[in-house]
């Protein structure tokens, strides 16, 4: 039965009955768990003989339907006159019901986690859970720890799915990680739709995927991921907290399709209260009374529901029961249901009391800040053969760590060494690179000059039959290949020969540069002189200076002074020294002919100038 049939009410004489609504999804595991935990909390509250308040819950099943949830809320407010509502779970349901709560001044204490819901916009909405966006930095820290530079985000087309996207994107941008693609799935996506999306992302280079799907869709999605061969070595799958939390209760076939997946979930600190509650949850008596919970592992959503119900009951006890009526319009014949609800006299006081409640609950320290619970830490988990194991923690202050309370002298850290051993997809222990060469992807075409002379810069060997480049060496080639190796992902390339006949250097080098502008080549490597007309068409690099690889682009006259400031000091000084030597030598050579004393001075001066130059 959906509801708390085993609630024990306060036995103190004169205790006042206060009605509250409970709207949860009785068709889901989470909804059933939260319903049971709510009933347990109220039963525990009433176990104290000194209570002067009897909290009377009225349970409604939203059945995963927005209209059903809204109808239930209106019925509870109009016909029962509840002073507060616990729930609903769904973000779209909570959004509508919170607006009703604001109109009638009744607090809506909901576990809905979409960032689109905010108490700053609706003061009567209290989020009795972590906002889904709170995990964004924890996920970004995992990506940073392994040095991946690109990710693909797969999310659900819903309030919950889209709500996290801007926060997650910002967190990734802060660590210079780009989002290569975003794929949207319908909450009711079928096999063909899922396989079509998987086929699209499989063709891409990126192999790091962040999946933010509702637990109703996520298991089916990963079954298809395995069928598509994308749960093999080289792939990285990161799941968000709701699915990661519920995965421990999944059946073996679903868990098998998650092998190697990593994720984050809210951390619940160990305490005496939690141990006692968990022991009670696993007892035979409890299983007998709640057969629907057989095989379901207690998780943070149930714990939050317990603490939320206890916080509301405590707030009602503190407020007192002087004004339980609703203020209604005298003539209600021509009013709609919403207009006929009236307003709660007690609602504002209950809201204030709940906001100020602080206690140590089964989920940890319960305290509402800015209308919602504040995350303390996230646990990083890895799905392995035997289930789900913890591999580390993330906190706002310290980042990733193997233990939750690291040395307080440590600064924020996000390193691979800060995590425990991980089993990756394909039962691999090797950290995936995060990218692969897509099948059928064209290579980067790099033009190289084939010429005689100055082979220390570029020397190209051509196959006489195929006319293709067999080997390319030289200083320019070495610099280019080192740059390509330093890229955060693999870029395949191939050299293409461009012949420079003797005696026609300048025109043909112009033609070589033109090939980049005309998009025949993606790049050109060689001893190419930087000229003004060429720099208008392409960008150059200078691999011959100590400052490294630098891009040279045309600058406006207004920026001439700034451009000069960007020239490395050593290179600028060397240029002036060389010019001084040249001018001085020219002067001494032309002026000193026939004068023995002057020749003696000239020889001495030339020796001094050359030894002081950077040649």
Image (cartoon, rainbow, N blue to C red):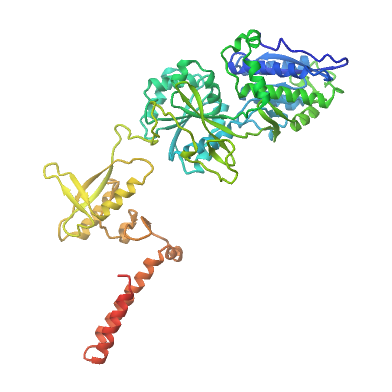
- Residue 412 to residue 231: above or below: below
* Residue 112, image x, y percentages: 63, 26
| The C terminus sits in image quarter | bottom left
Q: Is residue 215 visible?
A: no
* Residue 146, image x, y percentages: 44, 38
All told, the count of numbered labels is 0
Looking at the picture, tell me which residue is in the foreground, 289 or 346: 289
| The N terminus sits in image quarter | top right
- Residue 406 figure quarter: top right
* Residue 253, image x, y percentages: 45, 16
| Left or right for 215, reference 538 | right
- Residue 81 to residue 352: above or below: above
| Left or right for 485, reference 265 | left
- Residue 541 to residue 252: above or below: below
Q: Is residue 302 visible?
A: yes
* Residue 280, image x, y percentages: 66, 16
Looking at the picture, tell me which residue is in the foreground, 179 or 265: 265
Q: Residue at x 67, y 25 (%)?
A: 272
Q: Residue at x 31, y 75 (%)?
A: 611
| Left or right for 507, reference 356 | left
């Amino acid at each position: 039965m959906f509801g708390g049939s085993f609630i024990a009410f306060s036995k103190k004489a004169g205790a006042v009955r206060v009605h509250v609504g409970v709207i949860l999804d009785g068709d889901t595991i989470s909804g059933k768990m939260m319903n049971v935990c709510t009933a347990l909390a109220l039963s525990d509250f009433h176990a104290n003989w000194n209570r002067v308040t009897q909290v009377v819950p009225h349970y409604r099943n939203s059945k995963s339907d927005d209209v059903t949830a809204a109808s239930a809320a209106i019925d509870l407010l109009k016909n029962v006159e509840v002073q507060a509502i616990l729930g609903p779970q769904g973000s779209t349901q909570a959004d509508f019901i919170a607006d009703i709560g604001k109109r009638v001044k009744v607090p809506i204490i909901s576990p809905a986690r979409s960032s689109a819901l905010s108490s700053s916009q609706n003061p009567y909405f209290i989020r009795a859970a972590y906002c889904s966006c709170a995990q964004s930095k924890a996920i970004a820290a995992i990506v940073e720890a392994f040095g991946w530079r690109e990710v693909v985000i797969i999310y659900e087309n819903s309030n919950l799915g889209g709500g996290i996207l801007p926060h997650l994107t910002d967190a990734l941008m802060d660590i210079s990680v780009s989002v290569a693609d975003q794929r949207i799935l319908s909450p009711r996506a079928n096999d063909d739709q899922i396989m079509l999306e998987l086929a699209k992302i499989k063709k891409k280079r990126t192999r790091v995927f962040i999946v933010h799907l509702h637990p109703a869709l996520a298991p089916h999605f990963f079954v298809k991921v395995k069928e598509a061969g994308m749960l093999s070595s080289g792939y990285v799958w990161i799941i968000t907290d709701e699915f990661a939390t519920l995965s421990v209760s999944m059946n073996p076939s679903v868990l098998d399709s998650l092998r190697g997946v990593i994720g984050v979930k809210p951390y619940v600190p160990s305490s005496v209260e939690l141990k006692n509650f968990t022991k009670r949850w696993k007892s035979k008596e409890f299983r007998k009374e709640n057969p629907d919970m057989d095989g379901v592992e207690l998780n943070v959503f149930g714990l939050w529901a317990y603490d939320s119900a206890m916080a509301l009951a405590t707030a009602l006890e503190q407020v007192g029961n002087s004004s339980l009526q609703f203020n209604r319009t005298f003539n209600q014949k021509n009013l709609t249901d919403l207009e006929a609800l009236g307003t709660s006299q007690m609602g504002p006081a209950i809201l204030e009391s709940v906001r100020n409640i602080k206690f140590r609950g089964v989920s940890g320290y319960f305290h509402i800040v800015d209308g919602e619970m504040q995350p303390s830490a996230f646990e990083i988990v890895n799905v392995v053969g035997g289930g789900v194991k913890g591999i580390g923690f993330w906190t706002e202050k310290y980042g990733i760590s193997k233990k939750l309370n690291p040395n307080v002298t440590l600064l924020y850290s996000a390193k691979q060494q800060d995590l425990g051993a991980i089993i990756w997809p394909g039962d691999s222990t090797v950290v995936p690179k995060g990218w692969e060469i897509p099948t059928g992807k064209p290579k980067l075409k790099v033009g190289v000059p084939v010429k005689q002379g100055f082979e220390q810069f570029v020397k190209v060997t051509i196959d006489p039959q195929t006319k293709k480049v067999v080997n390319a060496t030289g200083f320019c080639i070495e610099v280019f290949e080192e740059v390509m190796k330093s890229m955060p992902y693999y870029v395949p390339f191939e050299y293409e020969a461009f012949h420079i006949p003797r005696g026609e250097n300048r025109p043909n080098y112009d033609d070589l540069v033109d090939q980049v502008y005309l998009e025949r080549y993606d790049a050109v490597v060689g001893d190419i002189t930087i000229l003004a007309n060429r720099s208008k068409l392409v960008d150059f690099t200078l691999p011959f200076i100590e400052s490294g690889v630098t891009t040279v682009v045309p600058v406006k006259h207004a920026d001439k002074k700034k451009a000069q400031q960007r020239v490395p000091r050593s290179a600028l000084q060397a240029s002036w020294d060389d010019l001084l030597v040249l001018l001085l030598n020219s002067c001494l050579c032309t002026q000193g002919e026939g004068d023995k004393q002057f020749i003696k001075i000239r020889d001495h001066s030339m020796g001094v100038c050359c030894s002081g130059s950077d040649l």
